[in-house]
Image (tube, grey):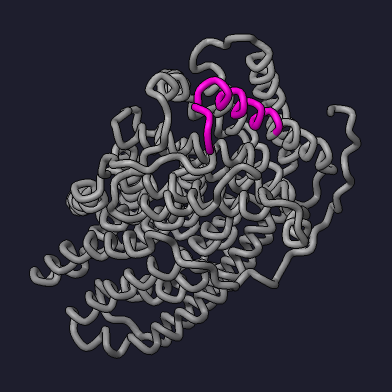
């Protein structure tokens, strides 16, 4: 496998335009972040409205917007993630407010804002906190740098943000009272549906439909494997093995069986299980003897007991992205100042929002950001007269735009930006009403400057380590495959070891595919070892299938393995 000849790749890549603005399907839980942010923002803002202190709303918004995070995480993991988000938000706000109170030098403020944006980008990516990532953190800290401030006011402003952050934490955790296993159920349902799609396309008898689908076989298989791996990660994130989670683990085992032998799978049964999980019905129970269940899930206990990988070891590969963010944000802010724009933090935040896993995705995000912001200023022009009619109307307009942004952004980033842009403009008017034409002009200029300069910085800071990361991922797959192969060769592997090796190999394959996809979107780099990646994925998935067949032959009773049995289960 190591002798395979790398496939030459072009050093300069064409950046796509088609498809960048195409709308996707809405998220399964689009209403949850939308309702959560309204529930988090409304009480603090309405309280300030009643007290006649809407000028303080920017500080409560810092804490309230934390409710946007961690909606896909199990509640035990969400509690920790939201706590870290609130602490990170308060830390960034504290640095910004103290800096603003010590200096009004715009160059210094932009430099500090760029440094904060780079740190926030690195931490959000390394912790994989998920949407909205570093953008909200960068918006709050950058805007706070340019808010008039004295050192004596900082403690009170931080206290407001902390109180709102605590309320946001409670809002984010509240659904656990009604549906305590909702995130795990959704992740398992997504895995079942992904495997059902793969089995339906590739597991039937030879036909013209399958022949056409065979061209996409590796990518479809990788997508299904990634969904199963994500579901396992969701179940392993809590460290608590309750009855509902054990039932979900059994369903994931059935998904792994279908992924290994799609010809024997029943896609409709998999989809039926997924539908039951999305509703309020009990978790479906699959047929298996008690001893077999213990054998299959013993590897999970071993994974829960294993120490987590240190955070600092994951920061190295993110260095190019962090450097892009720091350089792009700084240059965008400086360019905005040179043009005489009074709010350079808008250009800084525009640049901070662009940077994705590779330059191709960054380019796409830039196009989406510009289109969404330009449409958003038109929405602002339409709603500004209504918002200016009364402070209560201003608060209600912001709440409506908050809801709209989270409801639409899952369809495409530009569509959500149509609501985010007027909301951000209205937030600047909490302190005082401003001239709409001036706000619109400055926002358009800063958007164009931030996007252009940000993309230039992304092109200048090349990620030549992308190919090295593929080599590391290939090594990880090979080691995991060799371990699984050794266990397969043993007559009686220790209980749980084969299952643990199976999941380690699955994780390595998912990481390899993600690394290869990220590297393929970079430019100006060495040729990618695409042939080696394909061979590693093929051999890895064959070994995965062999581990599942070995487990099946020793654990599951004879009979129809495609259906399983649905019985009375546990609710969650």
Q: Is residue 66 visible?
A: yes
Q: Is residue 162 visible?
A: no
Q: Residue at x 53, y 29 (%)?
A: 558
Q: Quick one: quadrant of the N terminus?
A: top right
Examine the image and state in which quarter residue 466 appears: top right
Q: Tell me residue 412's x, y (percent).
A: 52, 68
Compared with residue 265, is residue 206 higher up or lower down, i.e. above or below?
Answer: below
Q: Which region of the structure is painted magenta?
A: 542-560
Find out whether residue 224 is within the magenta segment. Answer: no
Find out whether residue 543 is within the magenta segment. Answer: yes
Q: Tell me residue 9's x, y (percent).
A: 85, 49
Q: Tell me residue 540's x, y (percent).
A: 70, 31
Q: Residue at x 28, y 53 (%)?
A: 280
Dominant secondary-structure state across the stretch colored magenta: helix
Q: Tell me residue 338's x, y (percent).
A: 57, 69
In the image: residue 549, left or right of residue 168: right
Q: Residue at x 59, y 29 (%)?
A: 548
The image shows a total of numbered marks equal to 0
Q: Quick one: quadrant of the C terminus?
A: top left
Closer to the camera, 226 or 559?
559
In the image: residue 72, left or right of residue 510: left
Q: Residue at x 50, y 23 (%)?
A: 555
Outermost residue toward the front in this view: 559
Closer to the camera, 73 or 120?
73
Compared with residue 7, is residue 302 higher up or lower down, i.e. above or below?
Answer: above
Compared with residue 382, is residue 111 higher up or lower down, i.e. above or below?
Answer: above
């Amino acid at each position: 496998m190591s002798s395979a000849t790398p496939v030459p790749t072009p050093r300069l890549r064409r950046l796509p335009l088609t498809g960048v603005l195409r709308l996707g399907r809405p998220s399964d839980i689009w209403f949850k972040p939308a309702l959560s942010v309204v529930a988090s923002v409304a009480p603090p803002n309405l309280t300030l409205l009643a007290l006649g202190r809407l000028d303080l709303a920017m500080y409560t918004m810092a804490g309230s917007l934390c409710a946007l995070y961690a909606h896909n995480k199990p509640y035990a993991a969400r509690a920790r993630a939201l706590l870290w988000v609130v602490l990170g938000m308060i830390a960034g706000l504290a640095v910004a407010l103290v800096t603003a109170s010590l200096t009004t030098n715009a160059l210094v403020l932009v430099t500090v804002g760029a440094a904060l944006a780079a740190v926030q980008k690195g931490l959000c990516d390394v912790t994989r906190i998920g949407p909205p990532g570093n953008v909200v953190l960068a918006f709050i800290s950058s805007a706070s740098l340019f808010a008039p401030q004295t050192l004596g006011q900082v403690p009170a402003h931080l206290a407001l943000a902390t109180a709102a952050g605590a309320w946001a934490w409670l809002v984010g955790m509240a659904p656990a009272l009604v549906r305590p296993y909702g995130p795990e159920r959704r992740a398992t349902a997504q895995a079942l549906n992904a495997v059902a799609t793969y089995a339906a396309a590739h597991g039937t008898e030879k036909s013209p439909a399958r022949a056409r689908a065979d061209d996409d076989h590796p990518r479809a298989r990788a997508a299904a494997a990634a969904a199963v791996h994500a579901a396992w990660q969701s179940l392993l994130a809590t460290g608590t093995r309750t009855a509902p989670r054990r039932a979900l683990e059994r369903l994931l085992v059935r998904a792994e069986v279908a992924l290994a032998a799609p010809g024997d799978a029943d896609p409709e049964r998999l989809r039926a299980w997924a539908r039951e999980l999305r509703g309020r019905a009990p978790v479906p129970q699959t047929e298996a003897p008690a001893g077999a269940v213990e054998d299959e899930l013993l590897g999970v206990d071993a994974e829960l007991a294993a120490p987590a990988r240190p955070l600092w070891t994951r920061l190295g590969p993110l260095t190019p992205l962090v450097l892009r963010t720091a350089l792009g944000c700084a240059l965008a802010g400086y360019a905005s100042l040179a043009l005489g724009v009074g709010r350079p933090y808008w250009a800084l935040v525009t640049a901070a929002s662009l940077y994705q896993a590779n330059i191709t995705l960054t380019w796409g995000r830039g196009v989406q950001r510009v289109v969404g912001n330009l449409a958003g200023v038109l929405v602002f022009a339409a709603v500004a007269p209504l918002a200016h009619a009364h402070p209560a109307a201003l608060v209600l307009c912001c709440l409506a735009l908050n809801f709209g942004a989270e409801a639409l952004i899952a369809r495409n980033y530009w569509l959500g930006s149509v609501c985010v842009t007027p909301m951000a403009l209205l937030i600047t008017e909490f302190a005082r009403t401003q001239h709409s034409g001036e706000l619109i002009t400055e926002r358009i200029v800063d958007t164009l400057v931030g996007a252009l300069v940000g993309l230039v910085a992304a092109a200048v800071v090349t990620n030549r380590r992308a190919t090295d990361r593929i080599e590391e991922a290939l090594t990880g797959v090979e080691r995991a495959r060799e371990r699984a192969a050794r266990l397969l060769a043993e007559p009686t592997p220790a209980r749980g070891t084969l299952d643990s090796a199976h999941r380690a190999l699955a994780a390595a394959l998912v990481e390899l595919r993600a690394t290869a996809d990220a590297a393929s979107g970079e430019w100006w780099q060495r040729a990618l070892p695409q042939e080696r990646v394909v061979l590693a994925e093929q051999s890895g998935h064959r070994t995965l299938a062999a581990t599942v067949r070995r487990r099946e032959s020793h654990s599951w009773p004879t009979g129809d393995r495609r259906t399983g049995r649905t019985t009375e289960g546990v609710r969650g």
